[in-house]
Image (cartoon, helix red, strand yellow):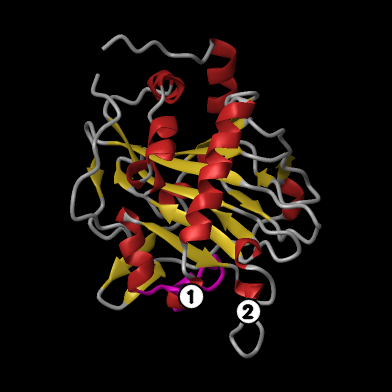
Amino acid sequence: MGIVGNLNSNQLQFFNSEGYLVLESFASPDEIKSLRLKMEQLLDQFDCSSRASIFSTRNQQQTTDDYFFESAENISFFFEEKAFDDNGNLKQPKKLSINKVGHALHERDPIFKSFSSSEKFLSLLYSLGYRKPVVIQSMYIFKQPGIGGEVVPHQDNSFLYTNPPTCTGLWLALEDATITNGCLWAIPGSHKDGLVRRFIRDETGVHFDKPSPSYDQKDFVPIEVKAGSLVVIHGDLIHQSFENKSPTSRHAYSLHVVDTDGCKWADDNWIRRKVDPEPLYSS
């Protein structure tokens, strides 16, 4: 196979202790430029008059539709909640109205596919102990100026559950992420408390199996990073981001990876694929 782990013992110790890890300069300026340019092209080609699906971490149970479910194997576009006026018209240009694009950029687009399966990602996953990893979803997140929506406290394993749990989030800053424009916040060490609840899909749609716990905001720490930095997020880490009320966007590219060796993808996850994803490698 020839894959060598690229994390040192100090980095692994920090990740295991805190539940997250920042890898500075993970992506080069040229790679960032390539991803952003490709997304501009995808947005230019998107006809927003034909589709207006809204993404919300507060109200996703109400806003989930077939378009959302089918996005698991497509490149789909989701608007910010605050993008529309009372008459249903966009209040700002299309490119400033999109919340995210997902959830199969890593499969459907050659630029994102090449980056998402690059050797540095494989080496990182190998360091984390993955034996047969797959990218189960990818998202380009915009965090638009002034209207970029809040992402409420959550754990990635809630949405992308395997038995045993194996999800890791890989969150790449394509612009500087600061407290002002909506950076990530996390409760260090919270991954050690295990999974709190699950996001279930059944015949009625999607819903959580338990109510959300209340969290003390004083327990969260900001994860401010420069463009090109990768934040590695344990699947049980409690993390969130606030609304972007600033005039500066906060673009990011996010991958979620699960293992397919010795674990089972839950049948009641929201993602139900027609074709199984290809493993990045098999150890």
The residue most toward the bottom is 87
Provide residue 169's location: percent of width, then percent of height.
48, 40
Kind of residue at disc 1: Ala
Q: Is residue 56 magenta?
A: yes
Residue 217's place in the image compared with 82, above or below, is above
Viewer can see residue 230: yes
Element on which disc 1 rests: loop
Provide residue 36's location: percent of width, then percent of height.
58, 43
With 257 as the anchor, is 227 left or right in this view?
Answer: right
Number of numbered labels in the structure image: 2
Q: Is residue 177 magenta?
A: no
**Which of 196/43 is in front?**
43
With 276 as the anchor, is 169 left or right in this view?
Answer: right
Q: Residue at x 73, y 54 (%)?
A: 217
Residue 147's place in the image compared with 90, above or below, is above
The numbered dot on residue 84 is 2
Q: Residue at x 72, y 42 (%)?
A: 177
How far apart are the two marked residues, 1 and 2, measured between alpha carbons? Answer: 10 Å
Region of the chain picked out in magenta, as a range: 51-65
Q: Residue at x 42, y 23 (%)?
A: 128
Kind of residue at disc 2: Phe
Of helix, strand and loop, which mostly describes the magenta segment?
loop
- Within 10 Å of disc 2 (Cα), the crowding (few <14, some 14-19, many 20+) is some
The reply to whether callout 1 and callout 2 are in contact (CB within 8 Å) is: yes
Which quarter of the picture shows residue 268?
A: bottom left
Element on which disc 2 rests: loop
Provide residue 64's location: percent of width, then percent of height.
41, 73
